[in-house]
Structures are given as C-alpha cells and as structure tokens.
C-alpha cells in the first residue's frame, strides 16, 4: 500500500545542481535527488527540466500522469521565470524578446517545428540598482533557450529563477529546501 501512494515534492533548486535522479557515474555533480531526504525519495523523479545554473521551483513525483500533464506542450502549462539583466529594459526590448522566443527553436537540430502556441508574457517586475528583473511566462522552452535568446539580444541573464509551474508557486521555501505537497 505504501508504495502506491502518490508523492509530490516541491524543491527550491539551488544553482550548480543537476535536474536528474542521478548523474553520470564519476561526474560527481549534485542532483535534485541528493537534496530531497524523503522516505520515498528513491521512487521520485523530477518533472521537466531546469538547467544546471538556474535556480527555482522543481517538482519531484512518482506520478507519471501528472508529470506528462505538466510537461507536454499540448497542455500549455505556463512556467514563470524571474530573469535578472543589467540595465533598464524598454518596451521595444520586451517586444524583441517575445518575438525571438516565439520563433526560437523552429529550425533546430530536430528539424522544423510548429510555431509556438501562446506568446510569452514579459513584464518588468522591479529595478534592483542597475539591474532589471523581468518576469517571463512561457508555455514551452527548450534547454537554455531563454538564456540563449537573451544573450543574442545583448541582455545576458545574470540570474534566472523559475518561480512557478502553472498555479504552483515557489513560496516560503529557502534555497535548497523542499516540502511535500
């Protein structure tokens, strides 16, 4: 009975952490599974991806159906990120980011893909000294795509954090901490 219980864990992933149940043997990198000391941890797998340097919300579960609903593009579950960039960001720059994100990956190595469904939503959250924090809501993104697009547009990301997956928000959880939902 215990083994069939659905487990859902929210983790505030720190940087320099691999989103995988285990690393390649001998690599010695920390994984999200290393951070979750849950009795059922050996049966948990991370939902979706978050690159090595990006911090923020990662969901771990043993529920394959939910994992598919949250990650498959057809369900259009939005992921919300806070991206810190240097300097002010004008409206024209926000439009350029949105346009580039809509077409990014269309001619990638897998061959042509359909244009993205929902356009990304981008807004300035706050100024932090000389930096601007942008909120970027996307329903679909590939590995490092947001970082690559921002670098291409001359606004390299200094810090990137995923703050929400759908309605599930990262709140009251310190870096490296987790809790069962």
Image: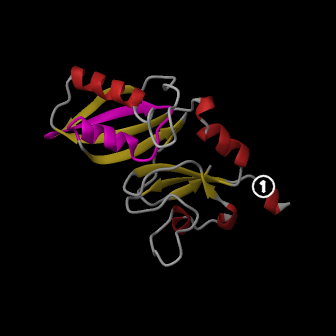
Q: From what the image shows, is residue 82 above or below residue 37? A: above
Where is residue 88 drawn, in percent x and y? 16, 32
Where is residue 180 drawn, in percent x and y? 61, 54
Q: Number of callouts in the render? A: 1
* SS of the residue under disc 1: loop
Q: Nearer the viewer, residue 107 or 132?
A: 107
Colour treatment of the image: secondary structure
For residue 39, say whether it is visible: no
Where is residue 80 drawn, in percent x and y? 44, 36
Identify the image quadrant of residue 123: top left
Where is residue 79 drawn, in percent x and y? 48, 36
For residue 174, say whether it is visible: yes
Q: Which residues are magenta?
A: 129-155
Q: From what the image shows, is residue 50 above or below residue 20? A: above
Q: From what the image shows, is residue 76 above or below residue 34? A: above
Say which residue appears at 46% left-offset and 74% top-offset: 27
Say which residue appears at 13% left-offset and 40% top-offset: 130
Residue 153 lies left or right of residue 162; in this view the side is left
Q: From what the image shows, is residue 39 above or below residue 91? A: below
**Which residue was labeled with disc 1?**
5
Q: Residue furthest bottom?
A: 26
Q: Would residue 176 be counted in the magenta stretch?
A: no
Say which residue appears at 44% left-offset and 70% top-offset: 29
Q: Residue furthest right?
A: 1
Q: Nearer the viewer, residue 145 or 48?
A: 145
How many residues crowd mark 1 within 10 Å: few (<14), some (14–19), many (20+)?
few
- Locate the N terminus by quadrant: bottom right
């Amino acid at each position: 009975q215990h083994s069939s219980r659905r487990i859902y864990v929210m983790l505030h992933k720190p940087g320099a952490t691999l989103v995988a149940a285990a690393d390649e043997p001998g690599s010695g990198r920390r994984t999200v599974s290393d951070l979750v000391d849950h009795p059922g941890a050996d049966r948990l797998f991370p939902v979706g991806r978050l690159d090595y340097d990006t911090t923020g919300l990662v969901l771990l579960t043993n529920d394959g159906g939910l994992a598919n609903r949250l990650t498959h593009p057809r369900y259009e579950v939005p992921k919300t990120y806070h991206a810190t960039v240097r300097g002010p960001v004008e409206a024209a720059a926000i439009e350029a980011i949105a346009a580039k994100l809509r077409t990014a990956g269309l001619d990638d190595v897998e061959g042509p893909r359909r244009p993205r469904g929902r356009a990304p939503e981008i807004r300035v959250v706050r100024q932090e000294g000389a930096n601007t924090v942008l909120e970027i809501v996307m329903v679909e993104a590939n590995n490092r795509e947001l970082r690559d697009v921002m670098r291409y547009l001359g606004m390299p990301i200094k810090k990137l954090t995923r703050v929400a997956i759908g309605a599930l928000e990262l709140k009251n959880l310190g870096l490296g901490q987790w809790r069962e939902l």
